[in-house]
Amino acid sequence: MTNANIKEYEPQPSTMKSRLAWLWSEYSVIIAFVLIFIASSILNPRFLDMNNQLNILMQVSIIGIIAMGMTVVMLSGGIDLSVGSVLALVGVISVLSLNASGSILIAVFTALLVGAFVGFLNGLMVAKGRIASFIATLGMMAAARSIALYIAEGGSVSGEVSGFTAIANNNLWIFDYPVIIFLAMTALVYVLMHKMRFGRYVYALGSNEKAALLSAIRVDRIKIGVYTLTGLLVGVAAIIETSRLNSISSSSSGVQYELDAIAAVIIGGTRMTGGRGKIIGTLFGVLILGILNNMMNLMNVSPHLQGFVKGLIIIIAVVFQKRE
Amino acid sequence: MTAEPFLTMQTIDKSFNGVRVLKNVSLNIEKGEIHALLGENGAGKSTLMNILGGVHQPDQGIIQLNGKMVKMTNPRVSQEQGISFIHQELNVVSDLKVYENMFLGSEIRNRAGFLNVEKMLRETHDIMAQLDVDINPKEYVRNLDTSYKQLIEIAKALLHNSNLIIMDEPTTSLAEHEVHRLFELMRNLKKKGVSIIYISHKLKEIKEVCDCYTVLRDGQVVGTGSMKEEDLETITRMMVGKSISQERFLHLHPFGETALQVENLSSEGLFRNVSFSVRKGEIAGFTGLAGDGRTELFESLFGYRKKYRGEIKIHGRSVKLNHPRKALKAGLGFVPKDRKENGIIKDLSVIHNMSLSAMGNFERVGFVQEQTERKKFQHYKEMLNIKVHNPRVTIDKLSGGNQQKVIIAKWLEAQTDILIFDNPTQGIDIGAKQEIYQEIIALSKQGKAIIILSSEAPEVMRICHSIHVMYQGEITASFKGEEAEEEEIMQYATGSKREAVKID
């Protein structure tokens, strides 16, 4: 009798506890974001200033767009180290096409095409060549940078068409175009990953490739699609990067972007081995990184120390996720 | 024979969770004897050996070595007593050299703490010479044949001065000439006074190399004696047992036209010249021992493996299947074995697992309609009696039986005419097993062609209309379901009998 009673009462607290655990595991990055946001507004009153807030959004937009692609790649169980170099390469080529054709539309189109094509090559190497994504994209990272340097003879190229800078420097109401593009890309990737079959397949592939294949999913095509999508998003990011200063440097543009993007994805709670993670998580991961950068600038932390703080945050984020 | 056997295990009893796995089991092994330990899957062989190896503790009973009582409290004690266990999967590191493998974990070092390579090489060489084999101790293990890898394990056992070696199905991954090499080695060891306990399903091999046998069934010793005095059929009968034949669910109904026809399918090293056909409404069973090639055969058929020759006809049309997607389009569904590795996608929810192979059924203008998915899952939940409170939880939260039902629902949703089930009741409790059998029969009544792969002959006998027995990649016999006898199936599965002409 007593045994039966105990059993009946047991589920109550355990579901409470499991609900809290679920809340934490699903939304820990949002909770962390809120905490960091509150802490920042207490530490420095200028943080909450509207211009400062919009500035943060503007600063994260390029990395944010790349991080969306990186999330998809990492959900599929891969990684793309080439994004920074590809950004430089796409930037250089699109500026050249801009100057040659005089048409902004052609420049934008070229950027998207080149980005997607390089991503497609990454996908081919990973899916058909069966090269580990780390190696394939490491190779692409070196190769794309080298070609960018060769084309631009090691220097920068500048746009000669007026109006091109409008893409990154104009605004709609209070929002700069890059912020709007970033949010639009986030929405796009969100729909693709959570509302369409492509996303379902990517999760399946990242979780268990053999089972995905045995479920009659065309695993190779999905992989190629994933890297192509990332390349395309890098193309979008490259347009903004180039348009911002009306020029791109073949040697210094996009350097270490892959690390920032991967950091945002990891902080956002996506598992390194794939199959688990959320687009919304990455969005908040990007925002957390943005706030940290902003706060360190506001509080006059030496720029040489900022990498240390960033590294610390990544490691803490991963330690917390391990406890699931 | 000496008065004292080398090893005696007396009246061993062992229960797991209140289920008695071993009942009053006794085993005697003489010095320098090769003793076969026989029994079907789940008869208690591994439990008994794990007790001897110190992995499990017996609830009752004693173990004596050379007349002295010993308590195998952990695997280390067992090893120190001179007992070595060679498992089915080989524990050699292929990127190390032979001598490095031999001394792995017990390397010889000189006083300064550096490895004494010279001495290890010499000792390895000595032992190899003892065994009459010619291996260069400096060779990398990855360059060696599988039989040599097995040999290294045996040599390792000798290095530890083992006088009893337990071999658990050592020949499953060996080619025929390698098996002979192993047997020669075993006879050499016997001459040196080493005893061997040999676990295998292959009766022909046992007849060839073993001196004595002990048969276990349902945790009890049902026979023991000298190998010479017994013929294989008697032993097979002992293993199977006559009394326990379970009721057959076999349901006879008229079949439709041929749904799947396979002709001369071969794949290098996996299967050879396999031909069979399955008609609509028919349940065809494939059985055999581990490593008989049936899983590889149907993985090839499903397009998962690509390197094979032969012809596949589905509904009379010749098809080329080199990707699971093509197999699905051609009308094949496949519920794989090892559910955890091949079946479920553990990070996806129960509903998403169900819909994965037929996403097209849930789409409208390219968007997935989650509501349609939920409704459809509700339908399967009732139909297959899937027990789940919230189908949005990830599938790994479900019990094995319910996971399997979700995988079955996935293939029902894909609406293929031919369904292949590889080991469908693996790790599933009895209640869910029955339900899965019933569902398979219901599907066959609807006119689907069904293929069941199982290593358990009784399972295929219960529900299959036709049974094909495989041995080393070939179909060695085919029976009508109602005519099949377990003993006969076992004889073909173990290779002790072969059929020249197949019956239709």
Image (spheres, coloured by chain):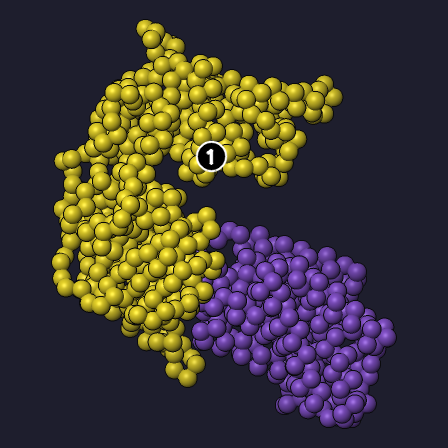
The residue under the point 47% across, 19% down is B188
Label 1: few (<14), some (14–19) or many (≥20) C-alpha neighbours in 10 Å: few
Q: Which chain is yellow?
A: B
Secondary structure of the residue carrying tag 1 is helix
Q: Which chain is purple?
A: A
| Along the line of sight, the residue nearer the viewer: A73 or A37 | A73
| Along the line of sight, the residue nearer the viewer: B347 or A206 | A206
Q: Amino acid at mark 1?
A: His
The residue under the point 66% across, 73% down is A118
| Picture quadrant where residue B316 is located | bottom left
Residue A222: percent from the left, percent from the top? Answer: 52, 69
Residue A323: percent from the left, percent from the top? Answer: 51, 51
Query: Up-down: is A153 above or below A102?
Result: above
Query: With B130 as the anchor, is B474 left or right in this view?
Result: left
The quadrant the N terminus of chain B occupies is top left
Residue B425: percent from the left, percent from the top? Answer: 28, 50
Question: What residue is disc 1 on?
Answer: B177
Query: Up-down: is A68 above or below B199?
Result: below
The quadrant the C terminus of chain B occupies is bottom left
Residue B102 visible: yes
Circle 1 chain: B
| Picture quadrant where residue B292 is located | top left
